[in-house]
Amino acid sequence: MDKVSDFKIFVENFLFTYRQFCLNEFLHEKVDSDLYKKYIMTWNTILLSLETDYLMGLAKVFDRSGETGQTISVYYFLDHNFTAHQDLISKIKKLRNKFFAHLDVRKMRDKEDFLKENQLNRGEISDLFKTINNVVAKLGKEFNLTEDFQEIFSQTRDEARNEGDTWLQPFR
């Protein structure tokens, strides 16, 4: 078992999930634009797709190994307690399990209450990403990797925003 290779897989998936979050955040900042108003259905489809996928990716970060075998998640590498974020993690997992990945009959019949009960805060999600990245940076050092994960995290955000802006330019 090569935990360093597994860790690199975890980091790659985590950074892709974070990139989706950053792109979603960037595009949300444009919802008052004429471009948004002109293509509202397409725009909302993109926003919802990114949001669904980054929340699914975050839920994967906190999966625990079970009946289907070992899962590459943060718990695969260490037994860390994310106490400050436990309520948020629980909501993300509920949304993944009952709404995104599976349409739970009881929850779908009372969808508005379920979504209200599990409403997420973008600032809290951003803080959770930062916390995970701090753990990633610590693990990287423990695995004797030379990558600066704090810098890579920051670059991922900047690249998502810059490329998002470049992508939008022909539509303006």
Image (cartoon, helix red, strand yellow):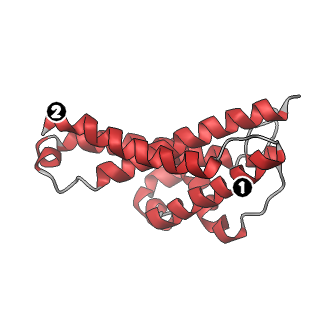
Q: Which residue is mark 2?
A: 170
Residue that label 1 marks = 135
Q: Name the residue located 81 percent from the left edge and 40 percent from the top edge.
A: 66
Q: Position of residue 22 (x, y in %)?
A: 43, 49
The residue sitting at 34% across, 43% down in the picture is 162
Residue 108 position within the rendered picture, expressed as x and y whole percent measured from the top left? 46, 50
Which one is earlier in the sequence, the residue at label 1 or at label 2?
A: 1
Looking at the image, can residue 114 be seen? yes
Q: CA distance from mark 1 to mark 2?
A: 39 Å
SS class of the residue under badge 1? Answer: helix
Q: Position of residue 39 (x, y in %)?
A: 16, 40
Assign a secondary structure to mark 2.
Answer: helix
CA neighbours of label 1 inside 10 A, class few (<14), some (14 to 19), many (20+): some
User: Which amino acid lies under the numbered mark 2 shown in the image of this protein?
Assistant: Pro
Q: Nearer the viewer, residue 133 or 151?
A: 151
Quadrant position of the C terminus in the picture = top left
Q: Residue furthest right?
A: 1
Which residue is drawn at the image coordinates 61% and 52% (left, top)? 150
Q: Is residue 172 above or below residue 111?
A: above
Q: Is residue 172 left or right of residue 85?
A: left
